[in-house]
Amino acid sequence: WNGDGSINRNGDGPCTANCQPYSDITGYEPEIDESERWQPLQETDGRGFFYKHDHVVPHIGFTAVTIFTPRSTLRDRSAPNPDYDYEQESQLVIQRLRDLATDDRQKMLAEFFDVKLRVGGAILRAMDIRLSGWSYEQRVRYIAGFTAAQYDAVIHAFREKRIWDLVRPTTLIKNGLAGDTITTYGGPYQGVQTIDAED
């Protein structure tokens, strides 16, 4: 899929040297001075390596070739302005993290569902059990159909993500919307703690 360069899979987009696979070919830049727009967050590998990543493949919603959905359908179907109550959304994130800090089952599920290949394998195993008589051809058709539909959905989601270019609640919390301190998840093995919001 997309061997035509529409997602810049080979890194041969518009650059002159050291071109990177999947790099943006539309010129997207975050609006750093606008507090309600998407902002890069600092990430870490937990071993001393810190980084702020660019927006992940911001171009695919506009350039990627779809499988089932015509490009005209993506242009004609736009989500309404979400018009979030940022303070309420930020408080929900804080509350959910506070709940997660003391719920080992939810932590396990979050870790499980974060690895997409593991989830796909679990779905196939469940289908094998439930549909013990399905043929190899039926299995291949299911995988191809499911993957193609999921691929088109990701393209549409990334298109909407770029159109609205909205800030994440985490950014707002770190910038003080929820106050100087918050009581929430304190980090691995720390439970619920009152911490500086910017942390």
Image: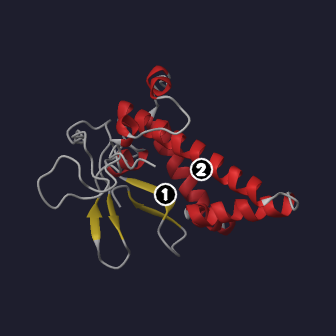
Tell which of 10 and 158 is nearer to you. Answer: 10
Tell me if mark 1 has few (under 14), some (14-19) or many (20+) residues whose alpha carbon lies within 10 angstroms of its own.
some
What quarter of the picture does the C terminus occupy?
bottom left
Amino acid of disc 2: Thr
Task: Give the residue drawn at x 71%, y 59%.
Answer: 123
Q: Height in image: 97 above or below 44?
A: above
Task: Give the residue drawn at x 23%, y 48%.
Answer: 13
Q: Which mark is on residue 147?
A: 2
SS at circle 2: helix
Expressed as whole percent of the image width and height from the top left, the position of residue 32 reads 21, 42
Quarter holding residue 196: bottom left
SS at circle 1: strand
Q: Which mark is on residue 183?
A: 1
Task: Give the residue drawn at x 38%, y 75%.
Answer: 46
User: Of callouts 2 and 1, which one flags the residue occurring earlier in the amino acid sequence?
Assistant: 2
- Farthest-out residue, bottom: 47
Expressed as whole percent of the image width and height from the top left, the position of residue 146 reads 64, 48
